[in-house]
Image: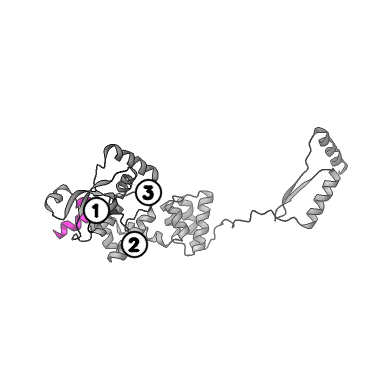
Amino acid sequence: MAALKRSALGRGLDALITMDDLKTGGSSSISEIELSKIQPNPEQPRSIFEEETLEELATSIRSLGVIQPITLKEIGPEQYMIISGERRYRASLKGGLERIPAYIKTAADENVVEMALIENIQREDLNSIEIALAYQKLIDNYGLTQEGLSERVGKKRATIANYLRLLKLPAEIQVGLKDKKIDMGHARALIPVDDPEVQLALYEQILAQGLSVRNVEEMVRNIAEGIQPELPEKKKSDRKPILPEEFKLLKDHLSRYFNTKVQLTCNEKGKGKITIPFATEEELEQLIGLLDKLK
């Protein structure tokens, strides 16, 4: 029985909650529970629920009801915590339901919260950082090794390790990965870089230039070999540079000479342009005549 339970746990909670279990197991029951008596699971790895997909599910629930019951754990007298099905719970709230069909797991069930976390990792469309945080939480809270976690979730140990390494990246890069500004390949390529400032500089270059994963891997290899990449310069102030005094004098002199308001712009490197405005063809001819005199 112990071997069967361990195998089922690796496949997720659905493998434990079958209709046969409900008839014979004695630790589960199915009921309609008031939504006001249900609370989300704080161990839920998903932190983002897209409003559009929730609204679509809510529309379906208004029309057809909740087809697949959610799974709850009884945590007190008429108080329940979600093990699986938080999207259905949220959509039911949006849909105006007062009750929802649910499987109830009793407090006597062992490792029910652990099973809930594993089940959500396996079934939900989580982003890479949410998965990494969920793996880390299982390791921290339940004393699992990477090898033990690998057996529980049915993933290779190398896969677990790759996700956990993402949590060593600077927070800005983790947020970028979570927000899909970069993909996991980019993030993994940055992990071997020891200096967080260099990691962030490379991250900014990925965003600015749309670098491929292969480009980033090549840059990181060059860094390892002592070849420093050309990193983007820090953003400069939007404030216009102050013209040197000689440029101001030149601008005033040209304005008087051409009898119009000449514009002169110049950057910090000395590059710039002179603009001589005119309003009519006659003014243009006059300007050309004045320019001819300068030859």
Q: Earlier in the sequence, mark 3 or mark 2?
A: 3
**CA separation, marks 2 and 1?**
23 Å
Principal secondary structure, stretch drawn in magenta: helix
Answer with left or right where residue 58 lies relative to residue 103: right
> Which three-letter amino acid code belongs to the residue tagged 2?
Gln
Residue 129 in the image: x percent, y percent? Answer: 39, 56
Is residue 14 shown in magenta? Answer: yes
Instruction: Work out whether residue 230 or residue 106 is closer to the camera in this orientation and state it.
Output: 106
- The vertical placement of 67 against 247, above or below, is above
> Which three-letter amino acid code belongs to the residue tagged 1?
Leu
Q: Quadrant of residue 149?
A: bottom left
Q: Secondary structure at mark 2?
A: helix
Q: Which residue is mark 1?
A: 72
Q: Tag on residue 136?
A: 2
Read off the magenta span.
1-17
Residue at 26% of width from left, 59% of height from top? 113
Which is closer to the viewer, label 2 or label 1?
1
> Which three-letter amino acid code belongs to the residue tagged 3?
Phe
Answer with left or right where residue 247 lies relative to residue 125: right
Residue 187 in the image: x percent, y percent? Answer: 43, 55
Q: Earlier in the sequence, mark 3 or mark 1?
A: 3
**CA separation, marks 3 and 1?**
19 Å
Q: Residue furthest top?
A: 281
Q: Residues within 10 Å of mark 1 (few under 14, many from 20)?
A: many
Q: Is residue 245 visible to the viewer in this orientation of the structure?
A: yes
Residue at 88% of width from left, 42% of height from top? 293
